[in-house]
Amino acid sequence: MAASRPHLLVVGASAGGVAALQALLGALPAGLPIPVLVVLHLPRDRSSRIAEVLAPYCALQVREAEDKQPLQAATVTFAAPDYHLLVEDAQTIALSMDEPVLFSRPAIDPLFESAAAVFGPQLLAVLLTGASSDGSEGVAAVRSAGGRAWLQCPEEAEASMMPASALQHAGADAVLPLELMCRRLKELFA
């Protein structure tokens, strides 16, 4: 039985995340019918060029988040430095200056938790490589709201702590090597 297509894809990554995101975003088809929101842990004290760096690897439009921006299909939106990226409602994102989570702003937990509250079972969350436990509470929120959570296989992640922590804390709907995760995403939207 084929899994139903999600209405939103949220992705979190930290240490080793640029290379993992290159592969993951490169696997998404040009006409992707849903929005993609990404938190990559970034230094808070300088501007980010991550959207510009990853755009050549992705067939979708890639941009940095702005407050009250509409969610847009076939678009990858990255959290801006020093702001949490939140799903405000089914049409809009928001930026937040709330306290850092596990020393990070942007952090993955606020994105996953806000997306789970709005999209519930229509959400797919992907947690990639990282060297903190950020994402664990978010994965728990996604799964308790009926959404799906895919984790990068900790053994092959450049930094295993993030997916391993989420797996221990919240479990997962799939634990996949990055290459297989990319293939599953392609199949999901074929």
Image (cartoon, grey):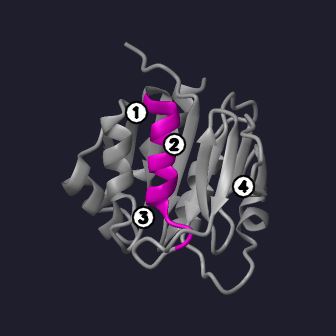
- Residue at disc 4, secondary structure: helix
Question: CB under 8 Å between callouts 2 and 1?
Answer: yes
Q: Amino acid at mark 3?
A: Thr
Mark nearest the camera among 2 and 1 is 2
For image coordinates 75% across by 35% down, the residue present is: 30
Where does residue 1 sit, x and y in percent of width and height? 37, 12
- Residue at disc 3, secondary structure: loop
Circle 2: is it few (<14), some (14-19), or many (20+) Cα within 10 Å? many
Where does residue 54 sit, x and y in percent of width and height? 71, 61
Mark nearest the camera among 4 and 1 is 1
Q: Which residue is mark 1?
A: 147
Residue 137 sits inside the magenta stretch? no
Q: Which residues are magenta?
A: 105-120
- Give the mark, 4 or 1, whose residue is nearer the N terminus: 4
- Give the mark, 2 or 3, whose residue is nearer the N terminus: 2
Q: Which residue is mark 4?
A: 57
Q: Which residue is mark 2?
A: 115
